[in-house]
Amino acid sequence: MSQVREDEENNNNIGEIPMSQMRQNPNILRASEPLIVQDYYTKSRERNKGKVVNDPVHNHMYFSGKLCDVIDTPQMQRLRELKQLGTAYYVFPGASHNRFEHSLGTSHLASNVYETLTRSTRSLKWDAEDKLCVQLAGLCHDLGHGPYSHVFDNEFLPLRLGKAEAKKWSHEDMSCDMFEWLVEDNGVDLSPRIVQKVKDLISSNDSGYKQNKFLFDIVANKRNSVDVDKFEYLMRDSKNTGISASVDMNRLISFMKVIDDEICFKASEVYNVYRLFDMRANMHHVVYTHKKAKAVEYMIVDAMVEADVGWNGRISHAIRDPKEFIKLDDTIVKQIEFSNEPELQKARDIIKRLRKRDLYVFVNEYTVPEEYLSDFKDVTEEDISTSYESNSTSNTIPGGLKPEMIIVHNVKIDYSMKDKDPVSRVKFFQELTDEESFHIDRSKVSSLLPTNFLERKVRVYSRIRDHDVEEAIAKAFSNFQRKMYGGCEIQATPSRSRKKRGHSLGHESQRERGTATTPNGTQRSAHTDV
């Protein structure tokens, strides 16, 4: 074991420090600083030296030579071309950060958590392989994201493959496939046992592991969703969008320990854990489901659908092979924009509208009443179009309102576990010396805490920037609410008065044709956040 406090150029002049001495030295093991060590386990065949990365969120992050061997690969570098927040960058100019730096930060936090746990839990022995595995899992957990991140798997794939087929694919599974290929393709010196363990940590698959299951709580915690992936993206996303962070993530890390093979927190931090999920919900409200960002998202999805049809499924079929998937990133929009194929003209028209900020139009929204949540079913474009009174004297849409003119966004915002309180699944301890854990009832924490952990909204957009079409959608949306909720409109605000304007880009036929259809000519389905 070697201690590294120098930069990369001094890494060859490192004094050996026994493990026991490192454990007794508080200056080395302070949780508030990254523990910078060169693991003896990974010294053998590293192509790179360790590196210190200066990061605006975590300050100095150290990566061993073995981690750098993985970082310096085409599979990992591809993440530089994937925006962390997808289309939110079109609304928040500071949100230019990519999956690459998020992955570095997640690996850094995973390392810090592992060091904290092995220090705070007497029964745990520091293990170089375990530490390397959680670092690699944090580093590679997002290798499987497609263009514009969640837009690809949540919106694009269901339209091209169908919902049932799209559900069989996940970016976590692709991350595992990409990592396995990364190791083989670049000759990274990792044993098959380590490769499999990293894949299991990414997918949170702890079956077959009889001990040290707490490792699966670090990067992708399926038990209660408190993990370093969430810590990192909330810290980075809030900083880059200018949203104030309400949670001290480093404090949460400092008060962790393992009891009964599960990560637990000091009881005094229970309110901080609730704030973690409240901050996540707030980021969904303010950033992740921002109305304009979603409008941009739907335009990019429509353009990708049209392009995929013109390219005979080149985009959607790439999910079958990591060697094809690596070609997909956010530059797909540029490829469409400057393509020459006649089959991509519709896709190019959509991108042209996007470049001119001629966006799809948000019309209105409503929040689903709490008493209707349990029986809620996604609202579809057909539900809205059929609520339009085409025989009305005020009908100004020849042929009536068509589903392809409309986009319905079924918004779901929760505390990570649908309608359940995730903190009820978190265990706590009283003192760091305790060996027993317990749950804390919400009523004993604060009477101001939420009692409902799921919210649903229904939003409608118009693909066509035309006054008459927008008014027709607004009226149909109001009629739908009255039909569903006993004659009442429950939208927060009445429909806004809308300026008279011509069709987008002067497309007179835009009413008659929707902007995007599926390859077999069927209409687009409603959009749902996951």
Image (cartoon, grey):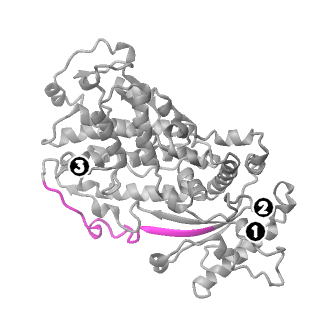
Q: Residues within 10 Å of mark 1 (few under 14, many from 20)?
A: many
| Residue 176 in view here | yes
Disc 3 marks which residue? 208
Q: Which mark is residue 137?
A: none
Could you say where residue 204 lies in the image, as x and y percent from the top left?
Answer: 33, 49
Q: Earlier in the sequence, mark 3 or mark 1?
A: 3
Q: Look at 34% across and 25% down and name the residue there.
A: 189
Q: Look at 62% across and 56% down and name the residue there.
A: 294
Choose mark 2 or mark 3, whichever is in front. 3
Q: Residues within 10 Å of mark 3 (few under 14, many from 20)?
A: few
Q: Amino acid at mark 3?
A: Gly
Disc 2 marks which residue? 465
Q: Earlier in the sequence, mark 2 or mark 1?
A: 2
Q: Which residues are magenta?
A: 436-459
Disc 1 marks which residue? 470
Is there CB contact under 8 Å for labels 2 and 1? yes
